[in-house]
Amino acid sequence: MRRKLLPFLMPIRSLVFIVVFVLISVISRKELKDISNTWSVVASAVNIITIAALILITRRDGGLSKLLNYEKGRTTPKQVIGMSVLILCLGMGFMYLSGFLCYGIIPYAPPMMIAPIPVPLAVINLILLPVSTAIAENSIYLGCGVGTINNRYLSVILPSFFFALQHSFIPTLPDIRYMVYRFLSFLPLTIVLCIIYRKTKNPMPIMTGHAIIDFLTAGQILATSAIPGFYDMMTAL
């Protein structure tokens, strides 16, 4: 695939999530809200498909490492720690602010994001979700987006927009306020990450910090899945 076509992969990821959740709803004969707890498993599955597709698309041009401009030994522990703290602070801060703006509650967190799933899936997803998300999302929005769009402004605006937008459909729910809340929660963070990547062209601090945050989320899902009553306790806070 020619380099100039890679940015068009960004909006496709959001469409894939919509299609997958709707198909699961139709096949299971359940409403979208009743399958929302499966979001982490769906995300991992879509991530794997995304990674496989990108490997095929970029195999003649150096693969994912070249797409992301990865260089071995370039990243320091200090960079990883700093990026992890930045992602955690910006992510949680704007999530709470968006919750207040959309729901009038601080702190607000959608209960389905830590809802229990079968324990074996939760165990597998403890590693699969953070690793696959870090590779898939950053390959799409940083590699295919920031890294291939020449205009300095559009190279940040478009990837950060679609980076945040995809979260509006994970999980997919027919609820406009929820979708706006999810979009606003992530937009400031995705803008900052795209700016940093455009300046440094080093994906590893962002990917590692991203994986750590998703690992914490997957850990919460495992806890609510394995510990009786823990989900009710968490959602009551």
Image: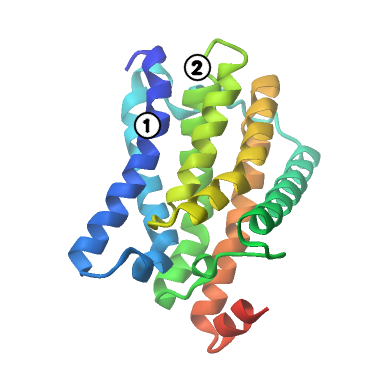
Lateral position of residue 77 relative to residue 176, left or right: right
**Label 2: how many Cα within 10 Å (few below 14, some 14–19, many 20+):** some
Q: In the rendered image of this protein, does residue 131 appear above or below residue 121?
A: above
Of labels 1 and 2, earlier in sequence is 1
Name which quarter of the figure residue 157 lies in: top right
Residue lying furthest bottom in this view?
228
Question: Marks 1 and 2: CB-CB under 8 Å?
Answer: no
Instruction: Tell me the quarter of the image containing the N terminus.
Output: top left
Name the residue rendered at 76%, 50% in the picture: 89
Asked whether residue 134 appears in the rendered view, the answer is yes
Lateral position of residue 43 relative to residue 195, left or right: left
* Tag 1 secondary structure: helix
Whole-angstrom CA distance, mark 1 to mark 2, is 14 Å
Q: Give the residue at mark 2.
A: 148
Asked whether residue 132 appears in the rendered view, the answer is no
Q: In the rendered image of this protein, does residue 183 appear above or below residue 199?
A: below
Nearer to me, 9 or 164: 164
Q: In the rendered image of this protein, does residue 114 appear above or below residue 127?
A: below
**Label 1: how many Cα within 10 Å (few below 14, some 14–19, many 20+):** many
Nearer to me, 62 or 160: 160
Q: In the rendered image of this protein, does residue 207 appear above or below residue 101?
A: above
Which color scheme did the rendering employ for the protein?
A: rainbow
Q: Position of residue 219 (x, y in %)?
A: 58, 68
The residue type indicated by label 2 comes to Thr
Q: Position of residue 102 (x, y in %)?
A: 61, 55
* Tag 2 secondary structure: loop
Lateral position of residue 187 relative to residue 158, left or right: right
Name the residue rendered at 46%, 56% in the picture: 128
> Which of label 1 and label 2 is nearer to you?
2
Q: Give the residue at mark 1.
A: 54
Name which quarter of the figure residue 55 lies in: top left
